[in-house]
Image (tube, rainbow, N blue to C red):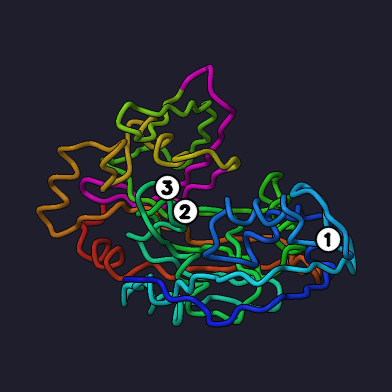
Amino acid sequence: MNATTKDKPEVQWVQIDEEAVGQRLDNFLFTLLKGVPKTRIYRIVRKGEVRVNKGRVEAKYRLQLNDTIRIPPIRVAERSEQMLIQPRLKSSLENQIIYEDEGFLVLNKPAGFPVHGGSGVSSGVIEALRQIRPDSRFLELVHRLDKETSGCLLVAKKRSILKYLHELFRGDGVEKTYMALLAGQWRRKKQVVDAPLLKNILKSGERMVVVSNKGKPAQTSFVRLRKFADATLVHASPKTGRTHQIRVHAAWLGHPIVGDDRYGDAETNKIFRSRGYKRLFLHAEQLRFLHPVSGELMQFNATLPQELQNLLDHEQTI
């Protein structure tokens, strides 16, 4: 669809509050002027059309408390009509909010949708969330989930909260628990996989991750929950946050995740597809961390999607 533009744009005056302190001017403008090409933003800064406290600054200038920014009249493309939100995604965004306060929200992300646009995808969960909440000044992903993974997804509503949560994720401040269905009968009750992961980009542009001594440290704890005739339900808790970590470590165990077209077993996937099951069985079931403001220990649980529950209900328990 063709983008529309706002009529008669006017000069904007923006005063910097605590949430934007320390941010680069260019990044601040990218967020504020969504729809305006980055080249256009750099041009108006370079020409001095953007002023901070009535003076010229460079794009890399770090914003300070109470700075006053003058932004020249500029037409901002309105993206609301450009992006069509699929009904299932819209329903999840509106009805699957697990928790929300002034600083962040947790939603139960549906499988089949990327968390953000890029790599040939025009939009994802975060772009759709911004569209249905046009009055929200700040909405940013705290972490990521694979397109085919469902479950707990954390979104910050303030820059200060985003910084705090990023620090938690970089350290060991967030406990993450996933539910996964592994191919075959895994006979151990518990195992910690400590195998470094190396990320490769194939000629096709596809990302493939392999266990390699040249890779980055990665650790995942697996705990068996239930055994079925040809599969094993487990909890997987990653201690690090490498790309495709749980999927690769499960395959390294010799029991790849059911429905994994990239690292899984083709014959197993074929058998499960014949039963009407077509998706990756990986669900971000739980997040635990200290609240950024109160310091209270918070625990969030995402209900297992019905298609996954149906599969478990029809499998033969051993």
Residue holding disc 3: 224
Tell me the CA gap for discs 2 and 1.
Answer: 29 Å
- Label 3 is placed on what type of residue? Arg
Say whether disc 3 or disc 2 marks the residue closer to the N-terminus. Answer: 2
Q: Is residue 28 above or below residue 12?
A: above
Task: Find out whether residue 228 is within the magenta segment.
Answer: yes
**Tag 2: Cα neighbours inside 10 Å, few (<14), some, or many (≥20)?**
many
Tell me the residue at 54%/61% (across/down): 286
Tell me the SS state at disc 3: strand
Q: Of helix, strand and loop, which mostly describes the magenta segment?
A: strand
Task: Check if mark 3's residue and mark 2's residue have beta carbons within 8 Å.
Answer: no
**Tag 3: Cα neighbours inside 10 Å, few (<14), some, or many (≥20)?**
some
Tell me the CA gap for discs 3 and 1.
Answer: 46 Å
Tell me, for residue 145, which label it has, or none.
Answer: 2
* Residue 129 on image: x %, y %: 49, 72
Tell me the residue at 18%/37% (across/down): 266
Which residue is most to the left? 274
- Label 1 is placed on what type of residue? Val
Q: Is residue 114 above or below residue 207?
A: below
* Residue 91 on image: x %, y %: 38, 79
Q: Is residue 43 above or below residue 293?
A: above
**Number of marks drawn:** 3
Task: Check if mark 3's residue and mark 1's residue have beta carbons within 8 Å.
Answer: no
Of the pair 12 and 211, the residue shown nearer to us: 12
Residue holding disc 1: 21
Say whether disc 3 or disc 1 marks the residue closer to the N-terminus. Answer: 1
Residue stretch rendered in magenta on the structure: 212-238
